[in-house]
Image (spheres, rainbow, N blue to C red):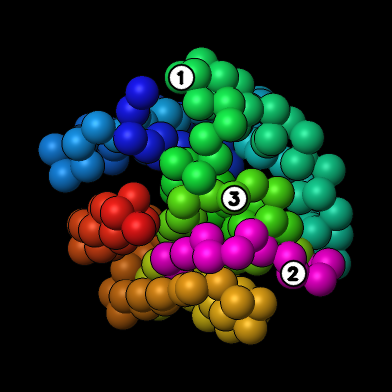
């Protein structure tokens, strides 16, 4: 059995292959780790790609409910990946790596404590969660966000970090002055080092 499973969660209007390339770069740094990059379950209605939940008519007020409604298909997607690799009961060996909408889903899974994950990495995300936070004990998180992000403001990650820390999550926040709504080279390398640390503990 592999030492661990890293599951990439892409942004809206994208697909799994968009982040799978990151796994290929990380493979030499993270031996004995399997990388999975599923497509989100719903077709994106405004172009190519997929989405975890609809952005049509989304507001800060209704976004948490959208995320809650997306949990069943999200959890089923993850469960199928674990089953595929014979790791059904090995959530403690799973690291979620999200970007944008994928980060929203990853942080929701962390905040709700649905799985005892090995770790969570969220690039350019936000915590769209209006319930009491109940994270699994000792699941660490790394939040990375660019100050130049014009899609999701960096203060969303700052706010998420404060809330998650207050709930007891071991958390690191890396803000990058010139990074836009993307994964920078330095962010990718920091995330690989963080994942290696998660899997050593």
Q: In this view, does 1 lie to the left or right of 49?
A: left
Residue 185 part of the magenta-drawn span? no
Q: Earlier in the sequence, mark 2 or mark 3?
A: 3
Mark 2 = which residue?
133
Task: Name the element at disc 3.
Answer: loop
What is the span of residues highlighted in magenta in the rendered image? Answer: 130-143
As rendered, which of 106 and 61 lies closer to the eye?
A: 106
Q: How far apart are marks 2 and 1 (CA)?
A: 30 Å
As rendered, which of 190 and 177 lies closer to the eye?
A: 190
Quadrant of image for the C terminus: bottom left
Give the quarter of the image for residue 147.
bottom left
Q: Which residue is drawn at 60% across and 64% down?
A: 137
Mark 3 = which residue?
116
Q: Which of marks 3 and 1 is nearer the N terminus?
A: 1
Can you say whether 109 is above or below 158 in the image? Answer: above
Give the quarter of the image for residue 43.
top right
Can you say whether 96 is above or below 169 in the image? Answer: above
């Amino acid at each position: 059995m592999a030492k661990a499973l890293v599951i990439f969660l892409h942004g809206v209007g994208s697909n799994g292959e968009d982040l799978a390339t990151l796994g290929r770069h990380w493979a030499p740094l993270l031996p004995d780790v399997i990388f999975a990059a599923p497509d989100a379950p719903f077709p994106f209605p405004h172009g190519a790609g997929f989405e975890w939940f609809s952005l049509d008519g989304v507001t800060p007020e209704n976004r948490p409910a959208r995320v809650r409604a997306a949990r069943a298909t999200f959890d089923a997607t993850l469960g199928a990946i674990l089953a595929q690799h014979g790791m059904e009961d090995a959530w403690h060996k799973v690291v979620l790596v999200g970007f944008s909408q994928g980060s929203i889903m990853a942080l929701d899974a962390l905040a709700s404590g649905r799985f005892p994950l090995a770790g969570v990495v969220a690039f350019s995300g936000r915590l769209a969660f209006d319930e009491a936070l109940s994270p699994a004990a000792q699941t660490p998180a790394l939040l990375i966000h660019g100050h130049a992000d014009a899609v999701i403001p960096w203060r969303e990650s700052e706010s998420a970090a404060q809330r998650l820390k207050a709930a007891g999550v071991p958390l690191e926040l890396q803000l990058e002055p010139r990074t836009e709504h993307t994964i920078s080279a330095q962010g990718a390398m920091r995330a690989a080092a963080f994942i290696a640390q998660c899997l050593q503990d």
